Amino acid sequence: MQVNFGEFTRIREIERLRKAFGAGRWRKLKGTASVRFDDGTIHRVELHWYEAHGIGRRKLKIKEYLD
């Protein structure tokens, strides 16, 4: 996976993230990866997720298919 670090200015869901996963320095990140789906196909996609030190990646979601 290739990660493009780009901290966005504000996370709208910050209180929900802290309540669900704990306090931390939450960042919203995006990157690209090859993903294998249940039907066996592999697609290049753009992913967005939240990450905090000591907590890890949470709430990965596919935003766009690149191929």
Image: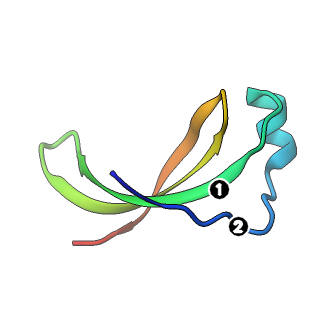
Question: Helix or strand or loop: what does disc 2 sit on?
Answer: loop
In the shown orientation, is residue 67 left or right of residue 47?
left
Toward the bottom, the furthest residue is 67
- How far across and how far down the image is residue 63, in percent? 46, 64
Q: Amino acid at mark 1?
A: Lys
* 1 or 42, nearer to the observer: 1
Residue on which disc 2 sits = 8
Residue drawn 15% across and 43% down? 39
**What label does residue 64 carry, if any?**
none
Horizontal placement of 48 versus 51: left or right? left
Relative depth, front residue between 44 and 29: 29
Q: Indicate how the structure is coloured in the image.
A: rainbow
Q: Earlier in the sequence, mark 2 or mark 1?
A: 2
What crowding class fits label 2: few (fewer than 14 Cα within 10 Å), some (14-19), or many (20 or more)? few
Residue sitting at x 82%, y 40%: 16
Coordinates of residue 24 in the picture (x, y in percent): 79, 36
Residue at 65 percent of width and 28 percent of height? 55
**Mark 2 belongs to which amino acid?**
Phe
Q: Quadrant of the C terminus?
A: bottom left
Residue 53 occupies which quadrant of the picture?
top right
What is the spatial separation of the Cα atoms under label 2 and label 1, in whole angstroms?
Answer: 6 Å
Q: Residue furthest left?
A: 40
Label 1 crowding class (10 Å Cα cut-off): few <14, some 14-19, many 20+?
A: some
The structure residue drawn at horizontal position 78% and vertical position 69%, both measured from the top left corner, is 9
Q: Which residue is mark 1?
A: 28
The reply to whether the C-beta atoms of the residues labelled 2 and 1 are less than 8 Å apart is yes
| Above-or-below relation of 21 to 8 | above
Which of the 4 image quarters holds residue 43?
A: bottom left
